[in-house]
Image (cartoon, helix red, strand yellow):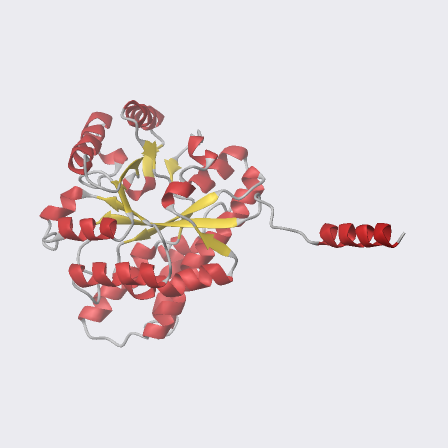
Amino acid sequence: MTRLLLTLILLALAGCTTLPSPHSAKRIALTFDDVPRQRGAFFTPDERTERLIAGLKRANVRQAAFFVTPGNLAKPDGAGGEQRIAAYVRAGHVIANHSFSHRHLTAVTADEYIADIDRAEAWLKGRPGTRPWFRFPFLNEGRRDKAKRDAVRAALKARGLRNGYVTADGADWNMETLTIDPAKAGKPIDMAALRDLYVETMLGAAEFNHALARRTLGRSPAHVLLLHETDLAALFIPDLVAALRKAGWTIVTADEAYRDTLGQAAPDVPSAQGTLTEALAWEKGLPEPRWYDRASPRVADPLFEQRVLRSQPR
């Protein structure tokens, strides 16, 4: 009788112990676009790479993905870019195709766009750490031109390339842009406020799209956060990773994120541009908002002016 009672108690306790469902687990990979990027607000490109690698290591991020635009090597700050890309790979990270010239798909013909992908792929071929992923510049997959969208999708498939989609975007590039001119002009910048705004904005992008994915898919996939190779990332990536983990996120590798079955989705929506979560929610008919509000400069710029530059609201 005593043994039976003990067994029942143990079973009851086991029933009260709930583990996170794989459908609700919060997992996210970090990815960085436009590599090698031009000079930012605070560092030389070499300094930025050193700091970003050190910051990722300090944050115990085992693998991030860097999407490379080889045409940037010919720009004024492109010198040494090939060595910086190799440094990311030596640190355990991976690289992938972000086109050669970073064009809008809607600004060129499908053939011209595909040739630009091929040119970048030729540069990447044989380099250590290369993955068969292509990320559309500006996340522009053709917008309303479905014929062009489908032509590029078919070309990627024929080349063994997968869409290097993103599921969360906080428009960090815009915050970097807002920082450059004040820094050059020697205006006061509240660095603590800049850090806090950067971290909460990128974390907010992850949280918004986690909730959107659960409403759309009934689960939260392994997410992919879009960042750029910016000075802000070099400064604040350990703070961002700490905030993500505090909010219950697990940082996963890009390899793991892109193994998610979500990558098989090819949503058919009226305008193909933006995050994959937004497109899938639109395809399912979920009501607006399907996009993170701070990804819009209309929302983000006043926050930056008020909090970082301490400007009075207009």
* 9 horizontally vs 253: left or right: right
Q: Is residue 236 above or below residue 288?
A: below
Tell me if residue 302 can be seen. no
* 272 horizontally vs 79: left or right: right
Residue 282 location, x and y as percent?
49, 37
Residue displayed at 22% across by 29% down: 114
Residue displayed at 20% across by 75% down: 186
Residue 95 location, x and y as percent?
26, 44
Split into 4 quadrants, where in the image is the C terminus?
A: bottom left
In the foreground, 256 or 10: 10
Residue 34 location, x and y as percent?
24, 48
* 280 horizontally vs 183: left or right: right
Residue 1 location, x and y as percent?
90, 51
Residue displayed at 67% across by 51% down: 18
Q: Residue furthest right?
A: 1
In the foreground, 54 or 222: 54
Quadrant for residue 59, please give it: bottom left
Quadrant for residue 102, please give it: top left
Q: Is residue 30 above or below residue 70?
A: below
Tell me if residue 154 can be seen. yes
Q: Is residue 306 above or below residue 106?
A: below
Q: Is residue 49 above or below residue 226?
A: below
Number of labelled discs?
0
